[in-house]
Image (spheres, rainbow, N blue to C red):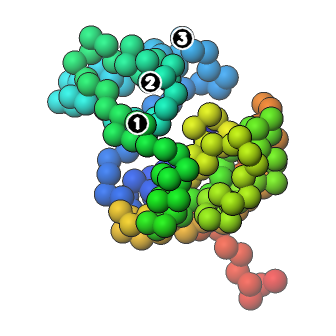
Amino acid sequence: MHAVRVELLQEQARSAGLPLHLIFIPYPCSNEEYEKAISSFVEKAKQEGVDCSAFGDLFLEDVRKYREDQLCGTGIEPLFPLWGIHTHELSREMVESGLRARITCLDPKQLPSSFAGREYDTSFLNDLPKGVDPCGEKGEFHRFAFDDPMFQKPISHVLGEVVQRDGFFFADLLSVATTIVPDLKKI
């Protein structure tokens, strides 16, 4: 849903010094297939000694309950460290602390398509239409963090094509580390 290339996720995890576990799901993916894939991963995590899982949910009770229900009886405790933080305060705090991110996906029913690919910064927050959650908590948009104080180095990337697919707008981000740059001497 976030439409971020795997190589960017890998670079992000390396820069943050965190392990990355990829869960592959088919496209399109039914909820049953999704839950089966997640359940399999949760079982593997439990076998590896994981006893809790943190989620970045902020205020949607139904989403929190869904996550709690999915982990119920697994021995893995769901944690919600950001729960209840006011999103207008949190969004400004994230930007002011050094978070840099880019909008990778948006729902045009909630946010104009011109926001796709924009940097998530003070200007972005100031330009949001009334009613749009500044953290995208209601599915208005998704973003990719390319720099943060916890990163060893920023994730170099370039903005690729913005496309509309399945009722959403997606901004393709390309890793500079894996993008083939033409030999300018030959042009």
Viewer-proximal residue, 34 or 101? 101
**Rendered image quadrant of residue 139:** top right
Element type where label 1 sits in the image: loop
Camera-nearest label, 2 or 3: 2
Residue drawn 37% across the image and 19% down it? 68
**How many badges with numbers are in the image?**
3
Going from N to C along the chain, the mark reached first, 2 or 1, is: 2
Q: Looking at the image, do the residues carrying marks 3 and 1 touch, with CB atoms under 8 Å apart?
A: no
Element type where label 3 sits in the image: helix
Going from N to C along the chain, the mark reached first, 2 or 3, is: 3
User: Local crowd at mark 3 within 10 Å, few (<14), some, or many (≥20)?
Assistant: few
Identify the amino acid type marked 3.
Answer: Glu
* Residue highlighted by disc 2: 64
User: Is residue 125 placed above or below 75 in the rendered structure?
Assistant: below
- The image position of residue 124, as x and y in percent, is 68, 60
Q: Which mark is residue 83?
A: 1
Camera-nearest label, 2 or 1: 1
- The image position of residue 149, as x and y in percent, is 39, 66
